[in-house]
Amino acid sequence: MKFEEHFGISGLALIGVILGVFMAVLDSSVVNVAIPKMMVVYATDQTTIEWVVTAYSLTVGMFTPISGYLGDRFGAKRMYVWALVIFVLGSGLCGAAWSDSSLIVFRVLQALGGALLIPISMTILFSLSKPEKRGLLMGIWGIAIMVAPAFGPTLSGYIVQNLNFRLIFYLNVPIGIINIFIAQTYIPELQAKAAGKFDLPGFVTCVVGFFCLLYGLSDAPTSGWLSLKIISLLFAAIVFLSLFVVFELTSDNPMVELRLFKIRPFLVSNLAVSFLMMAMMGWLFLLPVFLQNGLGFSPLQTGLLYLPPSLVTAALMPVSGALFDKLGARPIGIVGFSVMLAAAILLVNLNFNWTVSAIIAVLVVRAVGMGLTMMPLRTAGMNAVPPPLVNRASALQNTMSNVAGSLGVALFGTVDQTHTNLSLATYTQQVSVQSLQKISAYGLHPSVYGITNSADMSRLMSVLGKLAFQNGIRESFIVAVIVTVTALISSLFVGKKQKHVASKEQHAVAFE
């Protein structure tokens, strides 16, 4: 009871909110490591089985925007419980899937629940918590958001290596049932609001537009930005999302309240968070590739390497939240992004000579910046929103994060592949016996690979391929530096400490 009196929300209600978010975020990354195993079990190719991952991320991105309307229409607690039921049902069916096609369909069902869990959980937290304690609670809530993506590969690697891969889905069932009970019992009822008529034009253009955008961005590094497929998808995305913006700005009851961007702290904080998500998802995408394809790590070893920085982030989340309650978001954001920038600059020099301890040290530095920055910026933006619009603001904030994360993966992957191919083409054009001596300067001494003369071209091409791969990774981290600098600049404009939630008068001014 003392906890609830102090924070405005009971401890068990907070656990119910955090647990659902953790499961939803975890399932966005836990499947990746199991892809090779599922290819064997379902006797399918990589292109097909990768839709198990893609279908989940696309569905979450497409249906997150509607969470605000549903939370208003049916009540946040009711929708949160229903989202848990859908997620648990989808998880159980995924575990029982008998083919690759059935698994993909059940992943879409699972993702429908996951798309609602994160934004609605944020709404519940904001609705129940005391404003002066909101930063600390958001920091605790943020542990699930930041730790789950790193914990997922570790858990999945262990299960796939030692147990049955279906457990990565089945584990959600008992945990989810317990979570449904906690949420139903301990989260107070949050009354539904007058949501008005359903915005069908906005819904259709939103779903189609975000599908084309997110699918185009995820497939661009593979198919090529100039391929007909990607150009068509991105063109369709521009058309439908432009129509979506027009419908939302002219509708009396929009599904997504884009006019929230008139509130300056909300706009600026979300821009900073979006740049942060671009860098974070780009890192999460590329570093495992370098560790496994470049240094020969197993998936489990890669996951274990991410645990120390994840623990650092988890420890700093509540600290950054408490600091936000005292100082506001701007000073914490400046410090956090500066630390992240230092880590990004160090990673530009990443090469095959780096030791495991050196890589962990840089990841820990980056984790410090992430732990300090993410939740204060999110909270600052939400604090600027009037209480009646918290549902819509949470949906909009999470939609921006999803799009930014997809853009980060696409951008980093494209830069990596482009520079890898360019470097390899340059090296093969200039290759000679004498050029072998230059390779050692990059940490790849020829003698290690048995290369002693120009006749051994297969070994030579292997070395040059590794060197080109290394250059591609390093060029992509230059992009990370640029993105982090942009995020740092954005944080300068977040504003001073906000002591209270936006008033009705501020709301009226913002929407004039």
Image: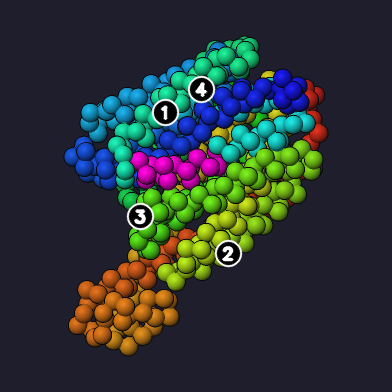
Q: CA distance from mark 1 to mark 4?
A: 10 Å
Between residues 378 and 94, which one lies in front from this camera angle?
Answer: 94
Q: Along the polypeptide, which appears first: circle 3 or circle 4?
A: 4
Q: Along the polypeptide, which appears first: circle 2 or circle 1?
A: 1
Q: Along the polypeptide, which appears first: circle 1 or circle 3?
A: 1
Number of other residues with Cα within 10 Å of mark 3, as a class: few under 14, some 14 to 19, many 20 or more = some
Q: CA distance from mark 2 to mark 1?
A: 38 Å
Residue at 71% across / 36% down in the picture? 135
| In this view, 344 is above or below 228 | below
Between residues 355 and 75, which one lies in front from this camera angle?
Answer: 355
Tag 1 residue: 172
Tag 2 residue: 345
What is the magenta range? 145-159
Tag 4 residue: 179
Label annotation for residue 298: 3
| In this view, 415 is above or below 407 | below
Quadrant that contains the C terminus: top right
Quadrant that contains the N terminus: top right
Q: CA distance from mark 3 to mark 2?
A: 26 Å
Q: Nearer the viewer, mark 2 or mark 1?
A: 1
Provide the secondary structure element on which disc 4 rests. helix
Residue type pointed to by label 2 = Ile
